[in-house]
Image (tube, helix red, strand yellow):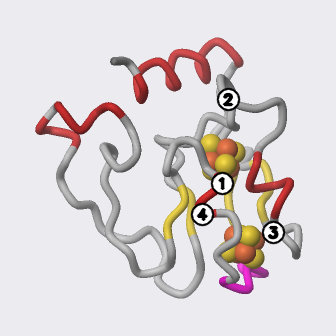
Amino acid sequence: MSIKITKECINCGACEPECPNNAIYEGGKNWRMSDGTSLKKKMKYTFLQNPIKNDIYFIVSEKCTECVGFYEEPQCISICPVNCCIFDSNNTETKEELINKKLFLHNK
Ligand code: SF4
Ligand code: SF4
């Protein structure tokens, strides 16, 4: 399951550097699958994608692994001062799927 950021976000930016998958972006920012991952070597993942939200921070669900493979707890949930990082029931994944996603993002 991916994490999502709700409209209560105060744009403090604390979560962004904590994400091991570079899955969190400031509102209005373009993003790439290859940002912060080993997909940099594969051209098709380097294309700039449109922002998912413009006014608040957002999480790219394709890149979020719930921190599986890095930490015991989702780091964005732990650090957010207003508790606006929550589990997204529209993006559910099994532990195995999350591990495979992590391997896909960071396969050397
Ligand atoms: Fe990034 Fe982990 Fe938060 Fe997902 S749960 S957005 S991987 S910090
Ligand atoms: Fe928004 Fe919470 Fe991230 Fe701060 S830590 S930018 S309030 S989601």
Look at the image and give the residue range highlighted in magenta.
Answer: 7-11
- The picture places residue 90, in percent across and down from the top left corner, at 66, 45
Q: CA distance from mark 4 to mark 3?
A: 13 Å
Using the rendered image of the protein, determine whether residue 6 is visible from the camera's viewpoint: no
Snapshot quadrant of residue 52: bottom left
Q: Disc 2, disc 1: CB below 8 Å? A: no
Asked if the beta carbon under badge 3 is closer than 8 A to the nearest atom of ligand 2, the reply is yes
Q: Is residue 92 above or below residue 76?
A: above
Q: Is mark 2 within 8 Å of ligand 1?
A: yes
Does residue 24 lie above or below 75 as drawn? below
Which residue is drawn at the image coordinates 61% and 50% (left, top)?
A: 19
> Mark 2: which amino acid?
Phe
Residue matched to label 2: 70
- Please tell me which of labels 3 and 1 falls first in the chain: 1
The amino acid beneath tag 4 is: Glu
Rounded to the nearest angstrom, the CA distance separating label 2 from label 1 is: 11 Å
In the rendered structure, find residue 18 and report the number of the disc placed on it: 1
User: Type of residue at label 1?
Assistant: Glu
Looking at the image, is mark 3 or mark 2 earlier in the sequence? 2
Residue 89: x %, y % from top left: 74, 45
Q: Are marks 4 and 2 in contact (CB under 8 Å)?
A: no
